[in-house]
Image (cartoon, grey):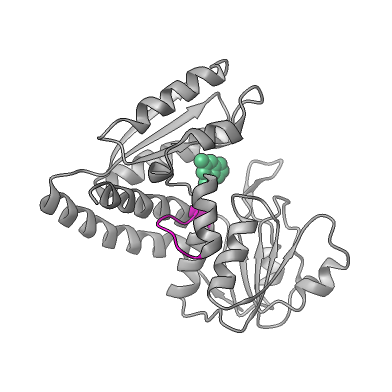
Amino acid sequence: MAIIIDGKATSLAMKEELKGKIDAFISQTGVTPGLAVIIVGNNPASAVYVRNKENACAAVGIHSETFRLAEETTEEELLALVRKLNADEAIHGILVQLPLPSHISEEKVIASISPKKDVDAFHAENVGHIMIGNYHFLPCTPAGVMALLERYGIEVAGKHCVVIGRSNIVGKPQAMLLLEKNGTVTVCHSKTKNLADITRQADILVAAVGRARFVRADMVKDGAVVIDVGINRLADGTLCGDVDFEAVKEKAYAITPVPGGVGPMTVTMLLYNTLTAAKESLK
Ligand code: GUN
């Protein structure tokens, strides 16, 4: 039976540490880190994430403002709000919850966020910094995965790391972060041939597919570290990841559960990025 990598406990410990850092920053500078979160429309999953972010900000002493905009908000209205927040000195981080309604260009909106306030690290300028390895912000989910590996003493250097998924939010930046830690990285995706042959070679397997229980036990090497980024809702309403947890935990050295694995880490990394943005704003 594998070590269960506890993202909930790890994120609580990290938030505790962060709260101390934020208290010290506020008393040294008189500046309270501020995060603006914008949500457009009525996506129920997004509404839950945004509420989690508000609660997490309150718990560590970050000032947060949430803008809940109607589904029929125009692209120009949203861009105008981002421009206003770019210029707002009390706001150090801006997060526009994705997905946006289909009549709004996510690309345009991300490009409009000041790179200095882009706590998601989605702006092309920040993506470029990550490629070069010279960055202030890391995208929250891949950064959360790296923090879990580090806190559980899992060495990346020299390991074969296989990432399933190539999204801009997770798969691509995850591959870059593993590479930066000297992993040997393979990125698989929906057109990959002989996927299971590749995943069976993984020392560290990261699943970011978006399909419930996609990774079966026969796709995993004995003793592998398995990181599950998926959050899928089954027909009966329960959450499950991209990995068949019950079967894979019997084979893996360590595995993240869903819920309680990577998910809580994502919000924690957002809070760290907000403090970083506030610090950088004073330079
Ligand atoms: N939607 C799903 N994950 C994310 C995320 O990390 N940031 C934003 N802005 N939207 C998301």
Examine the image and state in which quarter residue 8 appears.
bottom left
**Which segment is the magenta one?**
133-141
Residue at image coords 18%, 44%? 31
137 drawn magenta: yes
163 drawn magenta: no
Which sits in the foreground, 227 or 258? 227
User: In which quadrant will I find the N terminus?
Assistant: bottom right
Residue 271 in the figure: left or right of residue 283: right
Spot occupied by residue 212 in the image (x, y as percentages of width and height)? 72, 52
Instruction: Give the prevailing secondary structure in the magenta stretch.
Output: loop
Task: Decide if residue 230 is in sight here.
Answer: yes
Residue 181 in the figure: left or right of residue 198: left
Q: On screen, 161 above or below 121?
A: below
Spot occupied by residue 75 in the image (x, y as percentages of width and height)? 56, 21
Residue 24 in the figure: left or right of residue 74: left
Residue at image coords 55%, 16%? 74
Examine the image and state in which quarter residue 50 appears.
top left
Residue at image coords 60%, 77%? 183
Q: On screen, 229 above or below 202?
A: above
Which sits in the foreground, 205 or 35? 35
Spot occupied by residue 85 in the image (x, y as percentages of width and height)? 36, 30
Spot occupied by residue 28 in the image (x, y as percentages of width and height)? 12, 54
Tally the numbered discs: 0
